[in-house]
Image (cartoon, rainbow, N blue to C red):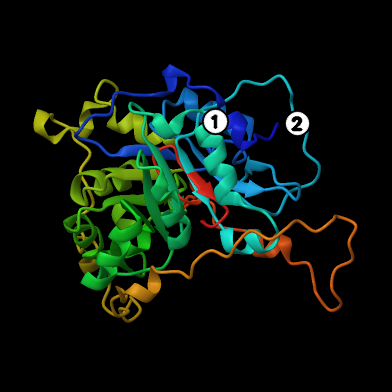
Amino acid sequence: MGMYTLDDIVELRPPQIWLNVQDTRPLIITHNGAGGVFAGSTDLAYQEAIKDAADIIDCSVQMSKDGVAFCMHSADLPPPQTHEKNRSSILVRDARVQHASYLAKRGLGVVESVSSALTKAGYDKETKQQVFIQSDDSSVLSAFKKFPAFKRVLNLEMEFSGASQPSLDDIKKFADGVRIHRSSVAQITGYFMTRFTDTVGSLQAANLTVFIGVLKNEFMNLGFDYFADPTVEIVTYSSAVMADGLITDYPATALQLHTSVRSPCSDMSLNLSYSILPAQPGALVHLAAPGALAPAAGPAPLLEPKDVVDPPLPPVKAVIAADAPAPKGTADNTSSAASFNAGKNSLLGAGIVALLSLSFLH
């Protein structure tokens, strides 16, 4: 399975991967390609995601020691990879960027590399296809402000139940949207859903686009209220929570449900005899035997400015020769420090619709 450099990913614009997005459903965004079907960030995973007709193809950006940006869900590389020279290029519109500060200190400018690749491919002047840059670092997103055509998405891995007004004001200074974890959408007690939080509502009220992920198909990953059915979870986030986009390891599952030609069961306005209904918070927890549940945990904290604002990025240091000895007592923690949560998909560590995640995100 070959590995893709960032230039490979943005090189072509195959029209067959773009769907006409309906206003009634969220964008379906891949997580390392179809990362639940094949090994994430491989050619097979990306080809499967294109075949599944995902709206957005993502790329979690990592940097090699010699400064080459490539798509990989983790900075910890597995044993030697085979790299096919004559493969098809794949378009990515979601880049996830992580660990920019750390890499800059090592002489690697991940922001510069992603900017160069997108500019070279003409995406800085793109008017028809939206590019999203996702990152968990506010300074990274601020660095992409010079590209007004790009949408910037803040990746938030922490669990929270709503957002304070000061934090919303800060986010809007550098981001157009937010990627949140499923645990921030609904309060769960002992695998039972007890209520929806105010997270999505507070973010959307501030005119921020909200993406939820990463979704998985395995039923052990789902709360009881979803009846071990990933499509019920998808319907819940799209029709009850009203998310703007879903990040998933299995784009085919989400698209089969939400493409009306394939599944009208997701359109409540059709009044069909059978429709897939969203989960109802609290509907099952009352059926549990008294004392069977652990004490309910308190609500998650509100999002505050300290959770979203990061220090400025340091300047990129001059690259040290490969054979130069490391300073005494300094351990090489490149792998562990550069590992990042790809999912949250990490889109190039800085974005979501064509998500490019720079090595700063998950």
Disc 2 on helix, strand or loop? loop
Using a 10 Å C-alpha cutoff, classify the residue at mark 2 as few (fewer than 14 neighbours), some (14 to 19) or many (20 or more). Answer: few
Q: Which label belongs to residue 155?
A: none
Whichever of callouts 1 and 2 sits on the residue coming sooner in the sequence is 2
Q: Which residue is mark 2?
A: 83
Q: Amino acid at mark 1?
A: Lys
User: Image height check: is 203 above or below 176?
Assistant: below
Disc 1 on helix, strand or loop? helix
Using a 10 Å C-alpha cutoff, classify the residue at mark 1 as few (fewer than 14 neighbours), some (14 to 19) or many (20 or more). Answer: few
User: Image height check: is 325 above or below 355?
Assistant: below
Judging depth in this view, the residue of 334 and 318 nearest the camera is 318
Q: Residue 45: x, y in percent? A: 57, 33
Q: What residue appears at the point 24 percent right and 58 percent down from the top-left corner? A: 200
User: Image height check: is 55 above or below 321?
Assistant: above
Residue 98 in which image quadrant: bottom right
Q: Which residue is mark 1?
A: 120
Q: Residue 258: x, y in percent? A: 28, 32
User: Spatial distance from mark 1 to mark 2, Cα to Cα?
Assistant: 23 Å
Judging depth in this view, the residue of 326 and 147 nearest the camera is 147
Q: Residue 63: x, y in percent? A: 66, 49
Judging depth in this view, the residue of 243 and 227 nearest the camera is 243
Left or right position of 131 against 232: right
User: Image height check: is 204 above or below 353?
Assistant: below
Q: What residue appears at the point 90 percent right and 57 percent down from the top-left corner? A: 323
Residue 271 visible in the displayed image: no
Residue 42 visible in the displayed image: yes
Quarter that holds the N terminus: top right
Q: Amino acid at mark 2?
A: His
Q: Would you say the residues marked 1 and 2 are in contact, meaning their CB atoms lie under 8 Å apart?
A: no
Q: What residue appears at the point 72 percent right and 48 percent down from the top-left corner? A: 64
